[in-house]
Image (cartoon, helix red, strand yellow):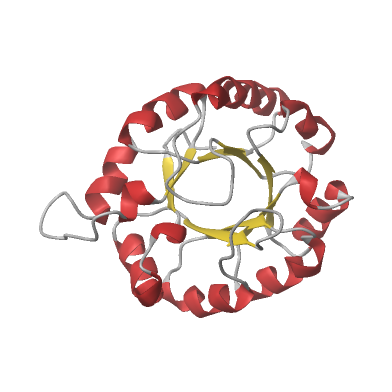
Amino acid sequence: MTNQVRIAPSILSADFARLGEEVAAITQAGADFIHIDVMDGHFVPNLTIGPMVVKALRPHSARPFDCHLMIAPADPFIAAFAEAGADIISIHPEAGPHPHRTLQHIRSLGKKAGYVLNPGTPVEVLDPVMDLVDLILVMTVNPGFGGQAFLSSQLPKIAAIRKRIAASGREIALEVDGGVNEKTAKDVIAAGADILVAGNAVFQGGNDVKGDTGYAGRIARLRG
């Protein structure tokens, strides 16, 4: 795992009327991943996008598509997101009865498997599946909506997971999502994260490419 902090702009905060252009713009601006929040209005209190939108966006960027499935059950949709062009498919342990099987299924499709911990989900849920995860995503807000305030109570969890990753000897990415901005990014990086998901911190204000106020400048400043 590289020590460089990588940035995954969340298109939940993009202009949905120009979504393809927005994905192309953040790619040009230096995004390392395209983070796609999938919500079903059941597992979380919001509705967003499905596999058809992922497929439509795929030609607009060669960056890895990082799909966070906030849906329950997740199993019936894994193959559809894989076929649509997702590179990383992340699930919540609470989103189905057999998360171990679901992680196996994701990897059998040739995709990287992610496991997501909500603020109230204990670190110990990772222990039985550390051999199957390629990415661990720590939510520093309760999932469902963008623009929420960062929960600093999750910083010890990030640090604890970093220790577990080191002990595993495996190459596992540690991603953080929720309230990440230039200020909170420093704390998140210090705790051990190497991928930062950022929505408003990248997209809010649009893309003024004339100066450092555009997407490229915001992405660069998030890296620290």
Percent across and percent down for residue 16 are: 40, 71
The percent coordinates of residue 133 (x first, y second) are 72, 43
Vertical placement of residue 52 versus 23, above or below: below
Front residue (pair 195, 13): 13
Percent x, y of residue 150? 46, 33
Query: What quarter of the picture does the N terminus occupy?
Result: top right
Residue at 33% from the left image edge and 39% from the top image edge: 222
Q: Residue at x 45, y 42 (%)?
A: 148
In the picture, which quadrant includes the C terminus? top left
Q: Is residue 19 left or right of residue 90?
A: left
Q: Is residue 160 above or below residue 146?
A: above
Can you say whether 20 is above or below 129 in the image?
below
Residue 5 shown left or right of residue 47 in the figure:
left
Q: Is residue 156 left or right of residue 110?
A: left
Image point 69% across, 35% down: which residue?
A: 170
> How many numbered marks appear?
0
Q: Quadrant of residue 121?
A: top right
Residue at position x 66%, y 63% in the image: 40
Whole-percent x and y of residue 14?
38, 63
Question: Looking at the image, which is closer to me, 133 or 138?
Answer: 138
Q: Quadrant of residue 11?
A: bottom left
